[in-house]
Image: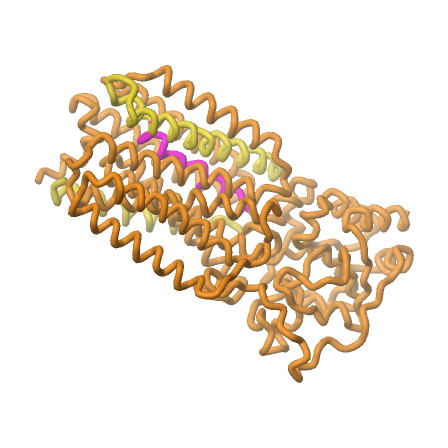
Chain colours: A yellow, B orange
C-alpha cells in the first residue's frame, strides 16, 4: 500500500475519532445504554468486509467459508444491536 | 502516490468505474451513523436517530452487495438470514434486566466478524501483503479475537454461568504478560515468514486465550467498564479491517465505536474514582479483608423492620428519593418500584429517583429499566444534580443498591472504595433499605449505612417487598 493511501486513511481515522468524541459527549446519561447498544450495532459494519470475502472467490473456498461465518456473526451484531436499541428507545418515547 | 488511490475501495473486487459511487454511498452511510449518535442527545429524537443509523447500514450493505463481480449470493444471503434470525430472536426475547449481557454477546459477535474477515483476507493473499496491510490485519485479528472471547466471558459472568467473583491465581499477570509477548513475537515471525500457517494459528489461539484470561480476574461489579472497553475494542478492530481493505466506511464507523467505548469507559472509571488499570488488574472485590485489623467496623446493629412499620414511614413522608441498584434489576422490581412511586406521588409526596452512574451492570442500566416501567425521565436525577438534596429529604428508599450508598467511601480511607463519589443518602431523615439478605455487596465490603440509627432495613426480595409495601399503604 502506498504511503499516500496510508496517510489519507489515518487522516480519516483521526478526524472521525474526534468527531465521534464530540458527538458522544453530548449524549445524556439516561441514554448511555442505548448509545452503547447503538454504537455496538454499527460496529457490525464489518459485514461489508464479510460480504466481499464471501462473494469474491469464484467458487466455494476456505476464504468464502470464513466470509460466510463472518457474515453470520456480523448479521447477529447488526440485527440484534439495532433491534435491542429500538426496543429500549421505544420505552423513552413519552 | 495519488491520493485518489484511497478512494478505490477494494479495487481488486471492483472495476474502478463503480468505485466512486460505492464510496459516495459509504460516505452517506457514515454521515447517517453520525447523525444517529447526534440525535441520541435527547430522548425525544433518539428513536429517529436509530432509524437513520439503520438506513445507513442498509445502504452500505445494499451497495456492497451490488459490487460488480461479486458472486456467492446464496451463501451470503443464507448467512445474513441465519444471523438476522439469531440476532432478532434474542433481541426480542431478552429481558430488559439482562441487557448488559446481551450487549456483551452482540459485541463479541462483532469482534468475531472482524477477526474472521481479517483471516479471510490472509487466506486470499497468502504471502502477497505489504507490511502496512499485514500489520492492520494482524491487529484486527488479535483485537477481534480477544474481543470475542472477552465478551463471551463477560456474558458468562453476568449470566452467572461462571463465578462472578474475580478468579485469580499466583503469577496471573506474569502469565498474561507472557501471552502478550508471545503474540508480539509470533507476529514478528509472521512478518518474516508471511506464509507460516503455524504462526498465524498461534496468534489466533493466543488472542482468544488472552480475552478469556484478561476478563477472568475482573469482578461482576466491574463488568460495566469491561463491556464499554470491549465495545471500543470491537470498533478498533473494525477500523483496522478498514485500513487493510481500504474501506472508508469501516475506518470511520470503527473509530466512532472506538470513541464511544472509550468515552463510556472513562465515565465509569471516574464514577468509581478508579483508574482503568486498577479495574483491569486489581481483582477488585476478591479479598474480603479481615475487618479486625484495629480498623473499627460498623457499630450498632442492623435493625430489621416489618412491612407495616416501613409503610407508615412512607405514607407520612413529604418527600422521597428512590435509589435503585443492581438488586432492583436482579429482582425485576422496576415495575413494582414505579407502582410505589406513583402511589406516593398521587398522595402528594414529592418523588424523585437518584441514579448513580455505576448503579447496575451497564452505563445507564437503571435509566433503561425505569423507562421500561414508564417512570418519566424528568423524575430521574444524576448524582451531581441531587446529592445536595438528601439533607432536606424526609425518606430515602434504597432498592438493592449497596456500594453506591456506602458512606465509607467518604469517611474511611482504608476502605477499598474510598474516594468513590457516593449518594449521601444517610443525610435524609430516614433511610429505608430493601435488601435480600445481610450479606456484603459486590465489592465485598461492609456498609455502615445499614447500621445507622436512622436506617430501617427491610429484608426480602425487592419485588415482593415493594408489592407488600404498596398493599400495606392502600
Residue at the spot 74% in from the left edge and 54% down from the top edge: B351
Image point (67%, 76%), residue name:
B291
* Residue B75 on image: x %, y %: 37, 18
Q: Is residue B255 magenta?
A: no
Q: Image quarter for residue B368?
A: top right
Corner quadrant of residue A9? top left
- Residue located 40% across and 51% down the image: B210
| Above-or-below relation of B222 to B369 | below
Please, which residue is most extreme toward the front here?
A: B198
Of residues B167 and B38, which is closer to you in this image? B167
**Residue B355 at x, y = what percent?**
63, 55
**Which residue occupies the foreground of this view, B425 or B418?**
B418
Residue under the point 33% across and 49% down: A17
Residue stretch in magenta: A31-50
- The quadrant of the rendering that contains the N terminus of chain B is top left
A85 horizontally vs A53: left or right? right
Residue B57 placement (x, y as % from top left)? 39, 30
- In the rendered structure, the answer to whether residue B387 lies left or right of residue B428 reads left
Amino acid at each position: 500500500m502506498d504511503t499516500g493511501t496510508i496517510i489519507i486513511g489515518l487522516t480519516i481515522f483521526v478526524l472521525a475519532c474526534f468527531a465521534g468524541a464530540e458527538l458522544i459527549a453530548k449524549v445524556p446519561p439516561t441514554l448511555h445504554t442505548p448509545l452503547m447498544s447503538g454504537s455496538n450495532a454499527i460496529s457490525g459494519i464489518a459485514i461489508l468486509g464479510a460480504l466481499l470475502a464471501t462473494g469474491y472467490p469464484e467458487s466455494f473456498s476456505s476464504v468464502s467459508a470464513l466470509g460466510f461465518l463472518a457474515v453470520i456473526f456480523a448479521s447477529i451484531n447488526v440485527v440484534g444491536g439495532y433491534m435491542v436499541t429500538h426496543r429500549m428507545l421505544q420505552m423513552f418515547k413519552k | 502516490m495519488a491520493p485518489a488511490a484511497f478512494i478505490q475501495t477494494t479495487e481488486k473486487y471492483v472495476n474502478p468505474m463503480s468505485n466512486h459511487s460505492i464510496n459516495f454511498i459509504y460516505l452517506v452511510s457514515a454521515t447517517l451513523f453520525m447523525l444517529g449518535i447526534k440525535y441520541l442527545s435527547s430522548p425525544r429524537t433518539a428513536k429517529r436517530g436509530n432509524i437513520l443509523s439503520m438506513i445507513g447500514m442498509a445502504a452500505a450493505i445494499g451497495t456492497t452487495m451490488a459490487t460488480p463481480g461479486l458472486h456467492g449470493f446464496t451463501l451470503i444471503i443464507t448467512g445474513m438470514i441465519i444471523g438476522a434470525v439469531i440476532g432478532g430472536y434474542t433481541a426480542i426475547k431478552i429481558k430488559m434486566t439482562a441487557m448488559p449481557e446481551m450487549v456483551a454477546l452482540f459485541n463479541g459477535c462483532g469482534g468475531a466478524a472482524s477477526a474472521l474477515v481479517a483471516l479471510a483476507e490472509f487466506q486470499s493473499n497468502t504471502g502477497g501483503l505489504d507490511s502496512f496491510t499485514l500489520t492492520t490485519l494482524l491487529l484486527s485479528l488479535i483485537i477481534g479475537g480477544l474481543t470475542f472471547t472477552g465478551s463471551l466471558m463477560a456474558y458468562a459472568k453476568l449470566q452467572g454461568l461462571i463465578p462472578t467473583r474475580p478468579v485469580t491465581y499466583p503469577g496471573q499477570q506474569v502469565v498474561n504478560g507472557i501471552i502478550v509477548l508471545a503474540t508480539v513475537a509470533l507476529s514478528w515471525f509472521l512478518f518474516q515468514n508471511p506464509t507460516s500457517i503455524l504462526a498465524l494459528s498461534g496468534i489466533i489461539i493466543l488472542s482468544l486465550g488472552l480475552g478469556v484470561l484478561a476478563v477472568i480476574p475482573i469482578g461482576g461489579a466491574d463488568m460495566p467498564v469491561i463491556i464499554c472497553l470491549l465495545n471500543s475494542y470491537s470498533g478498533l478492530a473494525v477500523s483496522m479491517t478498514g485500513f487493510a481493505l481500504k474501506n472508508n466506511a469501516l475506518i470511520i464507523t470503527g473509530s466512532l465505536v472506538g470513541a464511544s467505548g472509550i468515552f463510556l469507559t472513562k465515565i465509569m472509571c471516574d464514577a468509581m474514582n478508579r483508574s482503568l488499570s486498577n479495574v483491569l488488574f486489581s481483582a477488585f472485590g476478591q479479598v474480603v479483608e479481615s475487618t479486625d485489623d484495629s480498623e473499627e467496623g460498623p457499630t450498632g446493629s442492623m435493625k430489621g423492620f416489618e412491612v407495616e412499620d416501613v409503610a407508615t414511614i412512607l405514607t407520612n413522608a413529604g418527600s422521597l428519593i428512590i435509589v435503585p441498584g443492581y438488586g432492583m434489576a436482579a429482582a425485576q422490581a422496576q415495575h413494582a418500584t414505579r407502582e410505589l412511586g406513583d402511589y406516593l406521588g398521587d398522595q402528594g409526596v414529592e418523588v424523585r429517583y437518584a441514579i448513580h452512574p455505576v448503579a447496575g451492570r451497564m452505563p445507564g442500566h437503571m435509566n433503561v429499566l425505569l423507562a421500561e416501567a414508564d417512570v418519566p425521565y424528568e423524575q430521574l436525577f444524576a448524582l451531581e444534580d441531587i446529592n445536595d438534596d438528601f439533607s432536606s429529604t424526609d425518606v430515602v428508599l434504597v432498592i438493592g443498591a449497596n456500594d453506591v450508598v456506602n458512606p465509607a467511601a467518604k469517611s474511611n480511607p482504608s476502605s477499598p472504595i474510598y474516594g468513590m463519589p457516593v449518594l449521601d443518602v444517610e443525610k435524609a431523615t430516614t433511610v429505608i433499605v430493601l435488601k435480600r439478605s445481610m450479606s456484603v455487596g459486590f465489592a465485598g465490603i461492609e456498609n455502615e449505612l445499614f447500621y445507622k440509627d436512622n436506617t430501617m432495613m427491610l429484608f426480602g426480595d425487592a419485588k415482593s417487598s415493594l408489592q407488600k409495601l404498596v398493599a400495606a399503604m392502600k
